Amino acid sequence: MSGRPGFRERLLQRPGLRLTLAVAWLLALLALGWIASARLEFSGDLRRFLPDARTPEQRLLMEELGDGPGSRLLMLAISGETPDALADRSRALHDALAGDPRFTLVTNGGEAGLDAFPQDLLPYRYLLTSSFDAAPLDADTLREALDARLQDLGSPAAGLVEPLIPSDPTLEVLALAEAWQPAGAPQRLHDVWFDKAGTQALLLVETRAAGFDPTGQLDAVGTIRDTFATQAAGSTATLDVVGPGAFSVDIGGRTQAEAQRIGMVDTIGLILLLLVAYRSWKMPLLGVLPLASAGIAGLTAVALLFPGGVHGITIAFGFTLIGVVQDYPIHFFSHQRAGLSPWRNVRGLWPALSTGVVATCIAYATFLFSGVDGLRQLAVFTIFALGIAALTTRYLLPGLVDPSPPDLADSPRLQRLWHRIEALPRPKWSLAVLALAAVAAIAWSPGAFWQNDLSKLTPVDPASMQRDTELRAELGAPDVRYVLVAQAKGSDAVLDATAALRPALDALVAGGHLDGYDMAARYLPAADVQRARQAVLPDTATLRTMLAAALAGSDFNEDAFEPFIEDVARAKTAAPLTRADLEGSPLATAVSGLLLEHDDRSTALVSLSGLDDPSDVESLAAQARTAAVDVRLLDMKAASESLVVEYRGRVLAAMAVALVLLVATVWIALRSPRRVWRVLLPTLLTLLVIVAVLRLAGVELTLFHLVALILAAGLGLDYALFFEHAGDDRADQIRTLHAILVCSLMTLLVFSLLALSSIPVLRAIGSTVALGVLCNFVLSLLVARQRAAIDAARAEPLP
Amino acid sequence: MLAAPAWSATQSADGAQRASQSRDRVPAPAAVAPRSVDADWILQRLTQHGATATPFVELRVSSMLKRPLVLSGEYRRPDAGTLVREVRAPYAETTTIRGSEATIARAGRAARTFSLARVPELAALQGSFGALLAGDRKALETVYALEADGVPADWTLTLTPRDARVAGRVTAIVLRGRDAELRCIETRPKQGDAQPTLLGSAATAAAAVDSLEAAQRLCHDVPR
């Protein structure tokens, strides 16, 4: 610190050098920030922010589904042109998206898989089709098929089917393509899906990215919108994209836009506030340096310690929490005056500042043991950020400030304000009443205490929700909430188990209780089913006899169907088709979402659409459950809410430990029960008051409120520490008052703007912190200062 | 029947001559040959005097079949927007083309509906029939390039699809007729033989036709 007094002296005498260094520091931070944002691996996977799964439902949700098949579906509607033009648009969009690896399924109801059916799998059609399950292939069936094919040849569209007929007289390829159409598919006009009114062309797209992955969803939805915008440029056609992914993208975009707007207003407000408070244009520049350094340090630490990627929420929460470091330079600036070396000044403030930082850091350290990756990242981020902000304020900032600004304690206006505050009555017992009232309000307010449904914080606007409901019904798209799940050791067991559910599910569909369902067994029958079909296929000699009988008297050549005989012979001896054989075919994508295979177990999903009563399927699942195959109806909403509850439990436990550690740290630093009491009372009381006010306002608390409470507590602790630290000296008290006024006005400005936001998650954070700032400021002012200072101030005459 | 080849040959030569005349825009000598026709003349005749129902005979050839498949039945136009192709022999099948969709109904089976976009052959059929029977040259010209040729007693109207998707399957549709009677529609696929549809008196004459050549002859030759 005193190693290079020469340099310090030089800095004190040369304002130009100070400014140059400050600008250089800012530029270095900008460069580092730019590098960090380019290099940082951002992970949007919400699962990293949730605790480990405990129940089977949670495990399914977290490890297997990534939100379930329904939530990876996007529903597209094109409208605004004539139906045939819309059909062309639908085809163009389909063709453009179909080859994109970001999508596992793109379908518009157009020609179903006929060209896409892989050539080497063609003979397998006789193992996949259920056409001959009820009655095996015989001469009569063949004869009938041949008659129909003759008519096909006589139709003007003969060219379409003629190439298929020699190897496939019963047109099983077409039968399979039709069977593989999504269940409950909408009507087809001009060969593509349309809604019932015939005014919107419909497409169904399944993203590869999980519903949990906002980045992947953003990419997918962006690709769709951009492709359509290019294709439909200059036309009247419009595209609607709905579905969970599109919603999360929309709400993410809206939140970001609003946060940016608020951030802009905040920045202007902060700069104006600093200009007014210090009458120096350098202060906004110098004031931002510790905060910016803190952000970069936090990001770097997280990036180094968590190579798996920094979670987006870590960044968002983290920057909210380190807002407190903006206060550090303010305290320093407010105390700087002529005749006081900046280094001396900062050394004087250091006990209060360091106590606040250490106490808060220790509190955040409890998150390191929460067992949740996202919370650990948050802890690392804030601890490093706070530490760096304190150290830069302590060791770098003194070299850059103007050493002799006017002493704020001399300001008549501040002095008048000071005296007016002194004249206020000191609360004593009224605080106890306030605390009791707050506890009573918390305990007896009506309404639920917690909000477990996190989606309530990022609500979809009613119009989009309506659109989602409409299109989901039109397309027969699967439910986002419920999915039927079968788990067992091998794929055959789960395929059999789900296939066995089909009669019961069909009955539900027939009864109108269910619109439709989809399962892997629809595309890939279990091996024993395939073997059974193989067994009843005629051998070559039998087939020849059969065919000869069918061909008797027909117009077809005797040898026209040799390829058919070959295909049946191949199907008769082929090894049953497995998942691996499908690789690279369009069927693979259909199956991949519905059959999840691991070394030790397989999971088959049955997606349900238009389910009226979950208990219908629940009882089905209960009946189908055996020792070997676990079949259950998964309520993804309930599973994710139970995860939120668990998560919150861990946060609350960490917060409780943090509170104890915080008290201990303050106790060790201040070493006097009276002082500890004065410092902690405003903070603890404020926490009670915030929760009470929120409860009285009917707000159900969420994780975001908890994080905001932590920030509010940190701010309150700092205010109290500084007021307490100012001691008996009147001038110092006035300077501290100025500093805390500026700090709390800044924080109040930022968070009350957030509190006015239309987005509930921003509102939750904003209102909680704004309330906390107000309450902390008032209580710290009235409680934290030393008694003697107050008495001395009262004895003085008014200036 | 024996004389047919010779007769056919003269007719073909005659046709080629007429075609070259038309291309060179040499006016036909009024006294010797009738005046040449244009698309408007043909369309007008067909609309005003053409029948709303006409028998047809079609021949289908396939390597899978022992002998050509001879279909007979009736084309009908119950209203301006609809074309019905009813096959009566050797089996019963009704194809209804309305708007941009076709429905095929077969005895004992549920009707199937599909888009014409998927079957350009059907679209070509409807386009030619529809516009012909409505006489709307403008509508026809948006879909096809028209080329009229011949004389009132023996004319051809060649429709070349403008849409690339249709053109990928069908190179041209050639209509042949005499005065107000459309005698034959020849759809020329991109691959394979032209499949003629004989209509009206040509269809009646074709009752016993048994080869593609014979049908094409009937399509090309106008009895005098």
Image (tube, coloured by chain):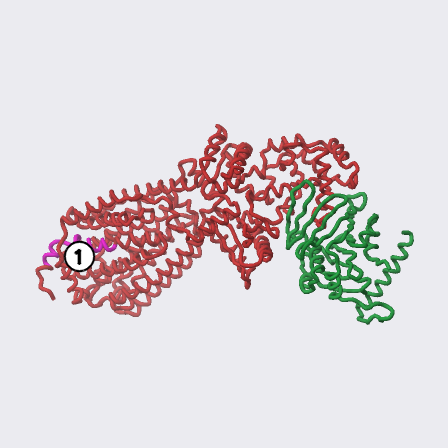
Name the secondary structure under disc 1: helix
- Looking at the image, the residue that sits furthest to the right is B2
Chain B representation colour:
green
Position of residue B223 measured from the top left corner of the image (x, y, whole percent): 85, 58
Taking the image as shown, residue A794 lies to the left or right of residue A719, namely left
The secondary structure making up most of the magenta span is helix
Taking the image as shown, residue A330 lies to the left or right of residue A733, namely right
Position of residue A748 measured from the top left corner of the image (x, y, whole percent): 27, 58
Residue B175 versus residue A719: which sits nearer the camera? B175
Q: In the picture, which quadrant includes the N terminus of chain A?
A: bottom left
Residue B41 image-quadrant placement: bottom right
The answer to whether A532 is drawn above or below residue A764 in the figure is above
Report how many numbered discs are placed on residues in the image: 1
Task: Name the kind of residue labelled 1 in the image.
Answer: Ala
Position of residue A136 measured from the top left corner of the image (x, y, whole percent): 67, 32
Question: The numbered mark 1 sits on a residue in which chain?
Answer: A
Q: Residue at 45% of width from left, 52% of height from top?
A: A464
Q: Is residue A570 magenta?
A: no
Taking the image as shown, residue A349 lies to the left or right of residue B107, namely left
Taking the image as shown, residue A6 lies to the left or right of residue A789, namely right
The answer to whether A42 is drawn above or below residue A143 in the figure is below
- The residue that label 1 is drawn on is A726
Residue A289 versus residue A400: which sits nearer the camera? A289
The answer to whether A763 is drawn above or below residue A519 in the figure is below
Position of residue A448 measured from the top left corner of the image (x, y, whole percent): 31, 43
Chain that the image shows in red: A
- Write the start and end of the magenta stretch as one range: A773-792
